[in-house]
Image: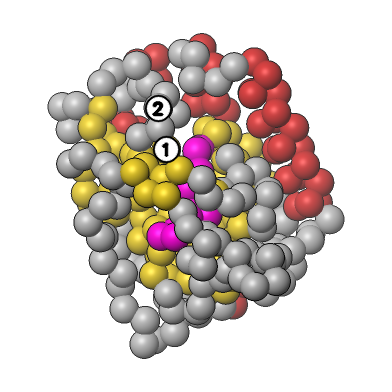
Amino acid sequence: MTADIVETTEGGPAGEDGAGRPARWEPGDHILWRYRDNASERIHICRPVTVVQDTDELLAVWMAPGTTCVKPVLADGTPVHREPLSTRYTRPRRTVRDRWFGAGVLKLARPGDPWSVWLFWENGWNFKNWYVNLEEPRRRWAGGVDSQDHFLDICVYPDRRWEWRDEDEFAQAQRDGLMSPAQAADVREAGRTALAHIRAWGEPFGAGWEDWRPDPAWGVPPLPAGWDAVVTGGQR
């Protein structure tokens, strides 16, 4: 499909209220959590989510099991993670629709942070881990938030152990020119800042979000037409 250009406007969620503060979404609102391709402005990941909380300090959203999402695959349909690392980021890709199976995901993001924190559960609400996804600070627009993934991640376990994840992909992305040396250094520094926050067990790690549960009345948000619209403007 051909994406439209969406201009953000005053008065909408990506605008401001009368006091000059960013307008906020309400709990239960449906928005899109999207990522741009690392080689272009094209949206290649899109996940409809339900707003849990939206304040000056934190945006929290819920991705329910069974949500129809958009994800990248290789042009021949091969899942990205099954492609050898040496060609994973150079072979042609396309996007497909798929469903998020298994338990849902709670995503937490503080404005301006170059990462978001995801909470994963196993079936039966057995808490599994936090996942710190290093990424570009999100830009708000009328329909949701946009970012770009920075490959490198941190997994944090209930006993406070942590480990770097996807360091091989982070290195390959640099070899393939998807990330400059300066940007890679910034991402590493963002990771070290996130680790300092983890070691101090600051929010959201010590805030009890692992005990949170979604409102049973919430449905599964649909994937809307125009999910890949290119947005100009927006707010971090």
Q: Is residue 203 visible?
A: yes
- Crowding at mark 1 (Cα within 10 Å: few <14, some 14-19, many 20+): some
Q: Which residue is mark 1?
A: 36
Measured as percent of width and height from the top left, residue 206 is found at 74, 67
Q: Amino acid at mark 1?
A: Arg
Left or right for 160, reference 227: right
The secondary structure making up most of the magenta span is strand
Up/down of 102 relative to 154, above or below: below
Amino acid at dot 2: Ser
Categorize mark 2 by other alpha carbons within 10 Å: few (<14), some (14-19), many (20+).
few
Q: Report the residue at 49% width, 26% height from top.
A: 169
- Asked whether 116 or 20 is in front, the reply is 20
Specify the quadrant that holds the N terminus. top left
- Tell me the quarter of the picture where residue 37 sits: top left
| Circles 1, 2 touching at the beta carbon (< 8 Å) | yes
Q: Quadrant of residue 183?
A: top right
Q: Nearer the viewer, residue 84 or 87?
A: 87
Q: Closest to the observer: 145 or 194?
A: 145
Q: Which mark is residue 6?
A: none
| Tag count | 2
Q: CA distance from mark 1 to mark 2?
A: 7 Å
- The residue range painted magenta reads 140-149
In the rendered view, tell whether residue 64 sits above or below residue 167.
Answer: below
Q: Residue furthest bottom?
A: 217
Is 54 included in the stretch rendered in magenta? no
Which type of secondary structure does the marked residue at label 1 adopt?
strand
- The numbered mark at residue 40 is 2
Left or right of 143 in this view: 16: right
